[in-house]
Amino acid sequence: MLGKERARTILEQVLALGGADETEALLLADEAALTRFAQNAIHQNVAQQDTVLRVRAVLDGRVGVASGNDLSREGVTAVFDRALQAARVQPPDPQFAGLPQPHPYPTLPELEEATASVTPAARAEFVGHACAKAEGSHLVAAGALETGLREVAVANSNGVLGYHAGSSAEFVTVIMGADSSGYGFALANTLSDLDVEAAVARAVDKALTGRAPQVFPAGHYPVVLEPDATADLLGSMAYTSFGALQLEEGSSFLTRRLGQPVLSSAVTITDDALNPAILPMPFDFEGSPKTRVSIIDGGVATGVVHDTYTASRAGTQSTGHAFPAPNPYGPRATHLSLAPGTASVSDLVASIDEGLLITRFHYTRVVRRPTVTVTGMTRDGTFLIRDGEIAHPVRNLRFTQSYVQALQDGCVIGAEQRLCGEYGPYLCPAVYIPEFHFTGVTDF
Amino acid sequence: MREILERALNTAQLLGAGYVDARLVATDEESIRTRNGAVRAVQRSQTTGLGVRVLVDGAWGFAGTSSADLKGAESAARSAVEIAKASASLKHRAVDLGTPVVHRATYVTPHQKDPLSVSLEDKVALLLAADAAMEMPKVAVRQASLVSLRRKQVFASSEGSYIEQEIVEAGGGLEALAVDQGEVQQRSYPNSFGRNQATAGYEFVESMDLVGQAPRVAEEAVMLLTAPLCPEEETTVILGPTQLALQVHESCGHPTELDRALGSEAAYAGTSFLMPDMLGDFRYGSDIVNLVADATVPGGLGTFGYDDEGVPAQCSYLVRDGVFVGYLMSRETAATLGMASNGAMRASGWDRIPLVRMTNINLEPGDWAFDDLLADSDGALYLEMNKSWSIDDKRLNFQFGTEVAYRVEGGRLGTLYRNAVYTGITPRFWGDCDAICNRDHWAMWGTANCGKGQPGQVAHVGHGVAPARFRRVQVRPGT
């Protein structure tokens, strides 16, 4: 572990080097270990540690960035010199409004060091339990358990100085039968809070109930998306539309529609990196404090996330969503939450005469940005709903669907949120969508 | 350097490792990106580290450290052994690497101009000139980028290998995003995903003529805004080179990775429809379809001297005369089939274990001249340059979208359509391939964003293709 004082020493060493009008130093230190399993056995098992220094040097409105992992005095100086050299060779960027000014940071819980130092034997024990559960049901488990510690320290010549250390524990599994599979995911700040058992139980249940899937024709059907599928809707919208740069360029479905209803009044989406339960961060990668951002409130478009660069052009303040410089893709929402409704999953299923229950999606890609039209496959448990009840499992289907349209009139939001992780730590409930467009089926 | 690697090997062996390999990797990478007339990124990254992989009691352990010195080597070796012992507590069977592999060698990417020695000023000026040449009404975003990379790597194993390699890469590209009245269209050059890239020197970038191509790229993005939607139909399709490279990548490259077929990636990227019992008799495509894994092609982004287990770069068939005949393999996975590795085990850096990865997966050329193919394909759709890509976890059911679709009319590319997507099932699609262009139209394309593994790794791989024709393809508008 780098530690606060060692981090501060390195940052101050960078800021003491002369030649730039403004200087930013960012340290990213990672210690992570991951135990991977397949066929009910560990087949890959790794650990790595690295600390990277990134320096952003500003000279007459010209910005250069360099990085390196040699943290000796000479190494640190070399990174600064390369950043300065990069700044010198380019024309001024008239839209660059300077590095952030200092602001107070919110207080977050202290680091759980036990998670950072978990042993390989302890990880193997967790994995062993998961594999035993699968084996006990004559199923085969694959997946990974990762534990880690990340330190982020940032300082700039305007007086910004921040340090944050956080731990994380993540478990994912796909448990398979001969013709079925189930998915389980768990994410927590600490290993002690990681509910591996519940994730394994969900995956085993889906693998057992998903046996002997039948081919179901492509078409337009109502669906219930379980939370991991819902997370894909939020992830694709975040990628295409919830950042200020996409809004500015006109490719976001929120462009020129802030203040207007854009989704169902049942839909409220926020980004909140300060929620202590889901890998919180007090500041972003340029040292601006994280803020809670309302993106959709009761179906009305209320805002997008900013970094300092986009905020200055929009005449507003950064919301604390900068990524490490240089970042030509702009700020991104990372901690999204879809506010829960009141219906249980069984209520949602009961409302459907003929439709599908979707566990999650696989390999989704945006086909058309302005409507957030996405194609992908269902995976790890797709079930036919008939007369308000689960009838039988079906083989995976391909869909091509506008996610904006999916969350417009008629969608109903489930009552129970679950932490989902494919795109980031998202809090998602199940969602009922009255019409979802399935465009193909795998009948090979 | 040798002393550091030997310290890692010796420490691990003294602690009980039956096999050890260590890689010391130093990467120097420069990336430059311009956006709408401004330089948005000039970055130089230099990182060094050591990765140590061990087998203890027939189970794997790996540790990577940025402390690439004697102390770091010893610490990483200890950590790897401790991890391997934990792996051994839940192993399926003892890992068998097959026959020992011993090589002492050096390899340097053939190149003319070191891309990292070309001045930043010249590179920035090139990109700003290309950016300016894309400026026109309705083009909301103009982007241009260059990448230069040098990776020096030393591999040593307890079997006696000691291999020094220096891989040099250069790449660049343009993107224009046109926006009008709620419609958004993109054009890219020479490939989508930001650029084309090769194991080559800066001469590769100079050959692209980025400034000369820029106006056409922007004009085509604007033309697409008002082009008619691609109609829905089952039709004959000709895939242009970059889209065909993507098709090969997704529907041949990934499913022929043996670790996927054996279930190692089941929880993440998925498995494969190509199972070992299908080797030698499963019809993957039509008789004219020949696909090879060739890590020796000059300039290929998946070209190197030795893989990350010290196995020499080589060329082997995956599909011959339409029949599935081979996998991409590591030493361990090959041994499960009683075979030897074909040199496809690669890590993205010192901090990751090697995985079975594509090298250059190439569709061998056929015998058609492109103009003859157009003349023979009236009414077909010519689809080129990937815009969206999705395929299922067994690599069977795919849907790909392209930036442009042209109707072939009178032996020429005629009406332009927007938002074309096509879909299919892998072996049926390749089974309907009835024409492949000849070597005059064959070229290598670099894919620098191939993701796999947990923790995630991004590999640089290549694809050699010439345009090819496919019958009975379902095409529709991706509205």
Image (cartoon, rainbow, N blue to C red):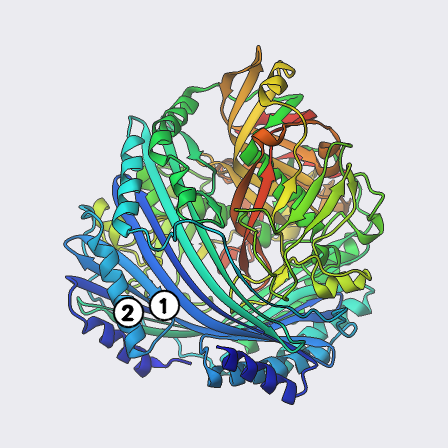
Q: Residues within 10 Å of mark 1 (few under 14, many from 20)?
A: many
User: Are marks 2 and 1 in one subunit?
Assistant: yes
Q: Amino acid at mark 1?
A: Gly
Label 2: which residue? A78
Residue B432 vertical position relative to residue B450 in the rendered view, above or below? above
Q: Nearer the viewer, residue B423 or A125?
A: B423
Q: How many marks?
A: 2
| Residue B393 visible in this rendered orientation of the protein | no
Q: Element at badge 1?
A: strand
Left or right: residue B1 compared with residue B439: left
Specify whether A302 is left or right of B171. Answer: left
Image point 27% across, 40% down: which residue?
Answer: B128
Q: Residue at x 33, y 37 (%)?
A: B142
Label whose residue precedes the other's in the sequence (2 or 1) = 1
- Where's residue A11, x and y in %? 27, 74
**Label 2–label 1 contact, CB within 8 A:** yes
Mark 2 surroundings within 10 Å by alpha-carbon count, few (fewer than 14), some (14 through 19), many (20 or more)? some
Task: Judge whether A29 appears above or below B328 on screen.
Answer: below
In the rendered view, tell whether residue A381 sits above or below residue A146: above
- Image: B449 above or below B190: below
Q: Which mark is residue A68?
A: 1
- Distance Cα–Cα, label 2 vs label 1: 9 Å
Residue at x 70%, y 33% (from the top left corner): A218
Image coordinates of residue A308 in percent, x first then y, are: 25, 54
Looking at the picture, tell me which residue is in the foreground, A391 or A217. A217
Location of the N terminus of chain A (image quadrant): bottom left
Res B311 seen here:
yes
Give the number of the mark in front: 2 or 1: 2
